[in-house]
């Protein structure tokens, strides 16, 4: 029998290039120490299912349609009876020993509902796991460049993200990336599962917001670092402009739910001004200006479509 403390769910869609490496991290553990592994096939058109079949410890759940990130993981809920639930991306790399360390950290911090280890990309570059909720105030400070006057500590408190302290464990995140997110089952039973109202992007933000509203904390375990390639499925499924548009649309929709339509429109307008400024900033690289130009178009289209 697998370890009863933790269940890992992994949703695959166009993931046949990464899922084997993901599962290899658990293949060397004994049956009694390895967590239960659930794989959701989100109607993937590639050979993901065939590659999952090479790992007999992985339990396959098939969906006849692509339910998105939230909907795919939520298919596992009725099968989970463990204390903790780890939502893991197929392009993330973890071992059984690392999951055990994550469980120990959650045991030591009973006020935390969700937590993530530190993440590094394929080149070893640290990723920004700890995030702040989208904020009109923060966007205004960035647009006016007033953040340049702040201390490092104040910038970390207001903006987190690239300014967050990455050496100390934290319980002060607003939200965390969903690439390797451990959830306390009792907290999920209180707050509810992720909303499939946001099928791609934004679901982790909205989920963390509900936990915070219920009085739970969101953690980052910086002492534990894992590799996350990032965006492999979406890169194969959507081109850059479409991915950017989906991120911005999801963020604005989440803000409507969190703060109301007027607040969401104000945030989009400010972010549009920031993106336009960055798109024509002579000090930015060609790639940075191109990204900001694509982001400007996405934000402008959101403003045009808002009733």
Image (cartoon, rainbow, N blue to C red):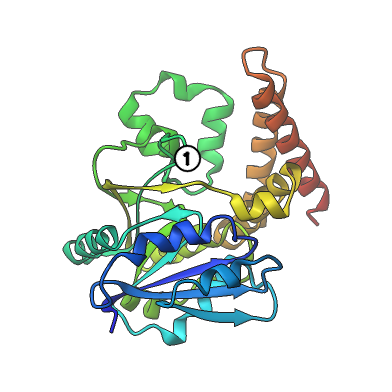
Q: Residue furthest top?
A: 282
Rate crowding at label 1 as few (under 14), some (14 to 19) or many (20 or more) other CA atoms within 10 Å.
few
Total numbered circles: 1
Element at label 1: loop
Instruction: State the residue at coordinates (43%, 64%).
Output: 23
Instruction: State the residue at coordinates (24%, 78%).
Output: 32
Q: Residue furthest left?
A: 108
Q: Quadrant of residue 86?
A: bottom left
Instruction: State the residue at coordinates (55%, 68%).
Output: 51
Give residue 276's position: percent from left, percent from top.
72, 28
Query: Between 239 and 154, which is closer to the camera in this rendering?
Result: 239
Q: Is residue 47 left or right of residue 59?
A: right
Q: Quadrant of the N terminus?
A: bottom left
Q: Quadrant of residue 165?
A: top left
Q: Quadrant of the C terminus?
A: bottom right
Query: Between 290 and 95, which is closer to the camera in this rendering?
Result: 95
Q: Is residue 269 left or right of residue 5?
A: right
Q: Quadrant of residue 29?
A: bottom left
Q: Which residue is mark 1?
A: 122
Q: Is residue 17 left or right of residue 193?
A: right
Residue 64 visible (yes or no): yes
Give residue 82's position: percent from left, percent from top.
31, 80
């Amino acid at each position: 029998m697998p370890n009863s403390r933790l269940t890992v769910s992994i949703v695959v869609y166009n993931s046949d290039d990464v899922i084997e490496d993901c599962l290899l991290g658990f293949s060397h553990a004994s049956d009694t120490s390895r967590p239960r592994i659930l794989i959701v096939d989100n109607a993937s058109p590639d050979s993901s299912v065939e590659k999952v079949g090479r790992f007999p410890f992985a339990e396959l759940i098939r969906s006849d349609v692509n339910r998105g990130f939230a909907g795919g993981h939520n298919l596992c809920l009725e099968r989970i009876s463990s204390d903790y639930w780890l939502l893991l991306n197929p392009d993330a790399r973890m071992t059984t020993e690392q999951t055990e360390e994550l469980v120990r950290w959650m045991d030591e911090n009973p006020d935390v509902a969700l937590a993530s280890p530190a993440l590094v990309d394929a080149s070893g570059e640290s990723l920004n796991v700890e995030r702040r909720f989208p904020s009109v105030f923060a966007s205004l400070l960035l647009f006016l460049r007033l953040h340049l006057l702040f201390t490092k500590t104040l910038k970390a408190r207001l903006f987190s993200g690239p300014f967050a302290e990455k050496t100390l464990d934290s319980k002060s995140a607003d939200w965390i990336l969903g690439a390797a997110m451990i959830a306390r089952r009792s907290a999920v039973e209180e707050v509810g599962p992720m909303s499939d109202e946001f099928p791609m992007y934004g679901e982790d933000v909205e989920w963390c917001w509900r936990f915070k509203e219920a009085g739970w904390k969101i953690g980052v375990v910086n002492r534990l670092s894992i590799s996350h390639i990032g965006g492999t499925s979406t890169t194969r499924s959507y081109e850059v402009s479409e991915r950017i548009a989906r991120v911005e649309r999801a963020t604005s929709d989440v803000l409507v739910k969190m703060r109301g339509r007027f607040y969401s429109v104000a945030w989009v307008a400010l972010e549009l001004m920031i993106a336009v400024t960055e798109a024509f900033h002579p000090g930015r690289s060609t790639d940075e200006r191109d990204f900001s130009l694509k982001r400007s178009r996405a934000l402008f289209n959101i403003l045009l479509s808002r009733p």
